[in-house]
Image (cartoon, rainbow, N blue to C red):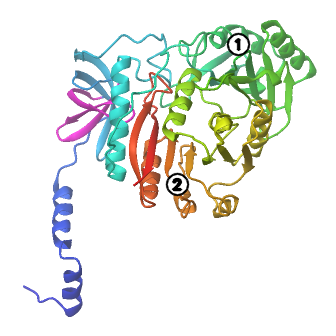
């Protein structure tokens, strides 16, 4: 055996397990990689569900993800793509179905890119989502919640008050495809109705397609967004060039006929062409202990939660967990138009003061108007880039004992460090991405705040989308 040099001996002492790791790596390389040709048919027992709702099984040691499969099922599947560590497949035939399988309610379920879980019964969907949240918290942050709140749920159909549709026009045949993108493709699945859309929006799909085809320049319309406020609906068109006066008049007449607002925006331009009462876009929040609902106005481009009823329950739970009381100073980060800040500030008779910070200045201005409309004076909306350390200047000379965060999917990385030194007693974190939330919760725990409670929010029924709320409490 060759003798080790002094440097080699020193390195080996620093990392005594290196040789073991090398052996494990070599053993993995020695295992024959199973190659599965596209189109191959497999008979598999599915043992689990992936985070995106696909059945998971193994074939000759290789992990297979089966679209449309459920845990506990025996299936015949067709390979769609093959990779070194796994393969992707689609369900061809059920040999043994799960007790939790139900018949999909949508006629384009097999092709549409949304509602991938409608073959799983609604109660089981909630269990799946809660388990997925728990697994990510445990795996990414070593967090085991002491308590799970009752999931926040709403109607499983007719719940979606906002949706974006794609378009494609065929000039030769003068036909227009209007619908959602196909799962895993750019192809458009045309729809004439959608069971998860607010009924008023779903009824607009057929007449909307007809009026778009009647335009002189239908091909300029690239996307359509449907939006349902409390009092009226709005259709927002994204166009590649300015529509002619004649086309604008056609759309204005359509809006008047259906009592809806019409908005048209050219790609990469800020200017909007408006028709109808855009000021009528608003929604109400009923807060326990407050005599009248809180009214929130919003613009077409502003963010609002897709599911109105679930949003109502989410706000109520956030206030319950935050426990606003006399003398509290509350920091609301990523505040939008005031979805959480205004209900918190409505506790004005208890002396609760709120500083609401948002990165989109148009929503900051809207938040200020909403506060004025509801007669709330103990709330300030300020503009801040919350991913920049300079945001700290807005609160470093003030003292906040409670905070609420509702960040985008990327999470709120670094926010906890910016809050270092604040006497935070309770923090409510609302997230649409448990992975980024798990990362951020670790940072908050380093400040002496422990995760006391976690709850699943079913904002998007029939999809694997995960929405979650966590409560952190000072040790």
Q: Residue 203 sits in which quadrant?
A: top right
Does 193 sit left or right of 381 as displayed?
left
x then y, percent, for residue 118: 41, 18
Q: Where is residue 231 in the image (x, y as percent from the top left)?
A: 73, 15
Residue beneath label 2, please?
424
Q: Image quadrant for the C terminus?
A: bottom left
Secondary structure, mark 2, is loop
SS type, badge 1:
helix
Front disc: 2 or 1: 2
Crowding around mark 2 (Cα neighbors within 10 Å: few <14, some 14 to 19, many 20+) is many
Cα–Cα span, label 2 and label 1: 52 Å
Q: Specify whether residue 463 is painted magenta.
A: no
Q: Residues within 10 Å of mark 1 (few under 14, many from 20)?
A: some
Q: Which quadrant holds residue 165?
A: top right
The image position of residue 468, as x and y in percent, is: 46, 36
Query: Magenta part of the protein: which range?
Result: 40-67
Q: Name the residue under label 1.
A: 209
Q: Which of 328 and 388 is in front in this view?
A: 328
Is 129 displayed left or right of 403 in the figure?
left
In the current view of this chain or complex, which residue is farthest to the right?
245
Residue plotted at (22% across, 43% down): 34
């Amino acid at each position: 055996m060759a003798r080790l040099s002094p440097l080699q001996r020193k390195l080996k002492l620093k990392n005594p397990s290196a040789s073991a790791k090398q052996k494990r790596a070599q053993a993995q390389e020695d295992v024959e990689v199973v190659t599965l040709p596209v189109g191959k048919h497999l008979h598999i027992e599915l043992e689990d569900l992936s985070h995106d709702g696909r059945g998971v099984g193994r074939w000759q040691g290789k992990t297979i993800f089966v679209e449309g499969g459920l845990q506990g099922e025996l299936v015949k599947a067709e390979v769609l793509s093959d990779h070194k560590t796994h393969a992707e497949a689609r369900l061809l035939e059920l040999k043994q179905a799960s007790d939790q399988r139900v018949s999909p309610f949508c006629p384009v379920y097999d092709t549409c890119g949304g509602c991938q879980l409608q073959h799983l019964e609604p109660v089981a969907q909630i269990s799946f989502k809660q388990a997925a949240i728990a697994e990510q918290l445990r795996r990414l942050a070593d967090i085991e919640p002491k308590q799970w709140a009752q999931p926040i749920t709403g109607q499983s159909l007719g719940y979606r008050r906002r949706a974006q549709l794609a378009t494609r026009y065929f000039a030769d045949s003068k036909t227009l495809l209007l619908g959602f993108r196909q799962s895993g493709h750019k192809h458009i699945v045309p729809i004439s109705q959608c069971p998860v859309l607010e009924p008023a929006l779903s009824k607009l799909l057929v007449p909307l397609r007809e009026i778009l085809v009647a335009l002189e320049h239908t091909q300029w319309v690239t996307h359509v967004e449907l939006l349902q406020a409390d009092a009226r609906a709005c259709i927002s068109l994204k166009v590649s060039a300015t529509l002619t006066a004649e086309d604008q008049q056609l759309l204005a007449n359509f809006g008047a006929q259906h009592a809806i607002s019409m908005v048209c925006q050219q790609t990469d331009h800020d200017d909007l062409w408006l028709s109808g009462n855009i000021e009528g876009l608003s929604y109400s929040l009923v807060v326990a202990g407050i005599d009248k609902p809180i009214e929130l106005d919003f613009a077409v481009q502003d963010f609002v939660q897709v599911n109105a009823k679930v949003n109502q329950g989410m706000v109520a739970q956030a206030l319950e967990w935050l426990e606003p009381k006399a003398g509290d100073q509350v920091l609301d980060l990523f505040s939008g138009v005031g979805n959480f800040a205004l209900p918190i500030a409505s506790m004005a008779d208890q002396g609760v003061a709120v500083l609401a910070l948002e990165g989109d200045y148009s929503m900051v201005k809207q938040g200020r108007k909403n506060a004025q409309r509801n007669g709330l004076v103990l709330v300030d909306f300020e503009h801040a880039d919350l991913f920049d350390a300079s945001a700290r200047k807005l609160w470093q000379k003030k003292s906040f004992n409670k905070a609420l965060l509702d960040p985008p999917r990327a999470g709120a990385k670094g926010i906890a460090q910016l809050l270092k030194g604040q006497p935070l007693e309770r923090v409510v974190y609302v997230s649409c991405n448990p992975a980024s939330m798990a990362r951020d919760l670790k940072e908050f725990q380093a400040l002496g705040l422990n995760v006391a409670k976690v709850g699943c929010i079913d904002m998007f029924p029939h999809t694997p989308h995960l929405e979650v709320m966590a409560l952190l409490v000072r040790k």
